[in-house]
Amino acid sequence: MSDTGRQSLTDKAGAALKPDSEKSTMEHLGDKLKGKSDSAASSVQPQNEKSYTQQIGDAFSSNSNDSTEVIV
């Protein structure tokens, strides 16, 4: 199982727990970019190839993917 291109749950939690008022403009942009790329990676990665922690993270962040294979 590979979570290449995915943001770890600790990174997601750290970004979510730090108040926006304490973040720099670069942190805001970085959070937005990481969120978009993580969502895209979640969408193309088949559910059966996701680690258990990524499945849980996707369930909480609404990034779940019901497909079982990717057609390229």
Image (spheres, grey):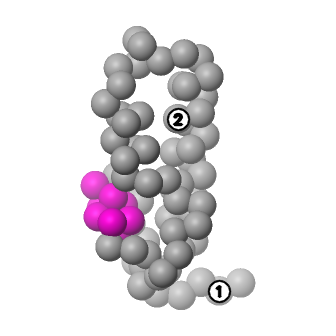
Quadrant position of residue 48:
bottom left
Q: Position of residue 69 (x, y in %)?
A: 53, 87
Residue at the location (33% across, 58% down)?
57
Q: Is residue 1 magenta?
A: no
* 64 on left or right of 33: left
Q: Position of residue 5 (x, y in %)?
A: 60, 61
Towards the viewer: 58 or 8? 8
- The image's mark for residue 31 is 2
Of helix, strand and loop, which one carries label 1?
loop
Quadrant of the snapshot with the C terminus: bottom right
Quadrant position of residue 71:
bottom right
Amino acid type, label 2? Asp
Would you say the magenta stretch is mainly helix, strand or loop?
helix
Q: Of all residues shown, which one is farthest toward the right?
A: 72
Task: Determine crowd level at label 2: few under 14, some 14-19, many 20+ residues with C-alpha closer than 10 A.
Answer: some
Residue at the location (58% across, 67% down)?
4
- The image's mark for residue 71 is 1
The answer, for residue 6, to whether it is visible in the render is yes
From the viewer's perspective, is residue 18 above or below residue 62?
above
Task: Give the number of marks.
Answer: 2
Q: Position of residue 2 (x, y in %)?
A: 53, 75
Residue at the location (41% across, 59% down)?
63
Q: Of all residues shown, which one is farthest toward the front?
A: 10
* Magenta residues, start to end: 53-60
Residue at the location (37% across, 52% down)?
9
- What is the C-alpha distance between the residues marked 1 and 2? 29 Å
